[in-house]
Amino acid sequence: MIKVTELTKRYRDTVAVRELSFEVPAGVVTGFLGPNGSGKSTTMRMIMGLDRPDHGSITINGRSYHDLAHPLREVGALLEAKAIHPGRSAYHHLQYLAETNGIARRRIDEVLDMVGLAEVARRRVGKFSLGMGQRLGIASALLGDPGVLLFDEPVNGLDPEGILWVRNLLKGLAAEGRSVFVSSHLMSEMALTADRLVVIGRGALISEGSVDDFIADTTGSYVRVRGPRLDEIARALESNGASIEPDGDDALAVSGLDIVEIGEIAGERRLVLHELSPQAASLEEAFMSLTHDSVEYHGHATDVVVATGK
Amino acid sequence: MTTVALPPVHTSSAAAGRSRLWRSEWTKLRTVRSTWWTLFAMAVVTLGVAAIAGATVSHNWHTFNVAQRATFDPTGITLKGLLFSQLIIGVLGVLVMSAEYGTGTIRSTLAATPRRARVLAAKAVIVGTLSLVVGEALSFSAFLLGQGLLRSPAPHALLSQPGVTRAVLGGGVVIALLGLFALGLAAIVRHSAGAITTYVGVLLVVPIILQTLPSSFSQPILKFMPFHISDVMTSVVTAGQGSSLSPWAGAGVLGLYALAALGVGGYLLVRRDA
């Protein structure tokens, strides 16, 4: 598991990541969500020991990355698509990585097979499509059979079949008990893949928890109520502690009571209902409302500027 | 912490870590074609110049005057092609580091080996060994080829003559030290074009600029320039003794060039974000 504690990273006068704390537990897919330039890639680079934090700490299975004797066997990462020498073959790319961490040769064939590149293993990477490059990046991440995996925007540039493959791969890796941390700016993708979410905006934590809680907590899910005597219904519900807002001309948006309670209250007073439906916001809406708030909130802090994403 | 369904990875002792890094760097170097092209180009120019020099001198010996015959250095003349090889080994040394930044593989490399100084040290071992082996092979081949083409009455040199073996060995040493110097420059500059420009600037451009300045100012500096040192190290007969370092002092100065570049490059590699 990964534990990030009060991480801060500045680039000259911009703050890319601010006092960020979260955990990536084993056995689930943790989505890392934020708008472009919110500090996701910077955070991942710091986890991998590539960028040095100005403040805070990161541990992987309780140790700092720098102290891992064979890091590839504990942490695998896909940080950039096609960060591979175009003149080298896929096999040789994996070979030199395997050699640094004492990983057996046969493991190279295994991961190439796993990502579907066994046929083109000896071909030079410069001739690969973006999707093939992405698969090779995933093969590098899996090379050391690590218990912790990071993927930065893994579905970028993949076709629908490739996206489905990545989605199932991530879930499968988590089901094997690994910690899987995957960043995306695509909320819809996270809704399908992730169990937990870490949401950041402008480098600061906005929310951390399960996907379901995230949606429930952040958008004020409400109950839509319609009926012929809306005024009476509204008064009755308000007297039971609900908060009411008009939802269009002929409906109420009720929060604070669930559909059972609303139905009981209406039944007691013999008020006819034409509609009683729970409204769950999409992850997308939840995300938009959250990051919007965060932008407004942080807009007054003069020392915070959106960092340029990579 | 994790239950792993995949087969376990091969384990080995921590003592093997250094040789594993060397092997990894050697894999990187031999699996890109630029390595073999640069070595091929070095062979062509070094042996080509040796052949042309041997044949031309033999042909034109009768036009040489007494002074020219007295200072003729059959060893040095056949090793002149190494000057071009010094430029080419610089490209190889630079690319070993800068190609990692250009392609983004530096992040894989440093993630696999978080102790970054060890990465640069392993690269230095591989670049140094390869360029020394190739440099010595080319230096001896050029010498033997050139001497074979030097026909009487033009004199030719033998390895048993004083200073000759030192000069021929020196040719390979120069190549190795300049390869390391280029590697260090690339660790500092991190861009192929910038590092190669810097390297060529130090080897070629600075001496040319110096020669436009008054000699009282330029002479004390010129003798420390790599091309000047390599000329001394690969020659048996040297003109103008006082204005040059000895071959051994020259080798030491070139070593300092390499050490300084690698030292600064290593420090920056550890300090900077990848």
Image: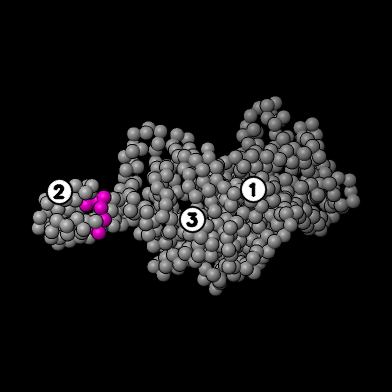
Q: Is residue A255 magenta?
A: yes
State the image coordinates of residue A89 (x, y, percent, origin top left): 58, 65
In the image, residue A162 above or below residue A12: below
Q: Is residue A108 magenta?
A: no
Q: How many marks?
A: 3
Q: Which residue carries the number 1 mark?
A: A67
Q: CA distance from mark 3 to mark 2?
A: 47 Å
Residue toward you, B200 or A138: A138
State the image coordinates of residue B128 (x, y, percent, origin top left): 72, 50
Task: Tell me the chain of label 1.
Answer: A
The answer as to whether the residues below labels 1 and 3 share one chain is yes
Q: CA distance from mark 2 to mark 1?
A: 64 Å
Q: Quadrant of residue A120?
A: bottom right
Amino acid type assigned to the residue bearing label 3 in the image: Phe
User: What SS does tag 3 mark?
Assistant: strand
* Residue drawn at 60 percent across, 40 percent down: B271
Q: Which residue carries the number 3 mark?
A: A181
Residue toward you, B213 or A140: A140
Which range is magenta? Answer: A254-260
Q: Which residue carries the number 2 mark?
A: A235
The numbered mark, 2 or 1, whose residue comes first in the sequence reads 1
Q: Residues within 10 Å of mark 3 (few under 14, many from 20)?
A: many
User: What SS does tag 1 mark?
Assistant: helix
**Which one is closest to the eye, mark 3 or mark 2?**
2
**Which one is closest to the eye, mark 2 or mark 1?**
2
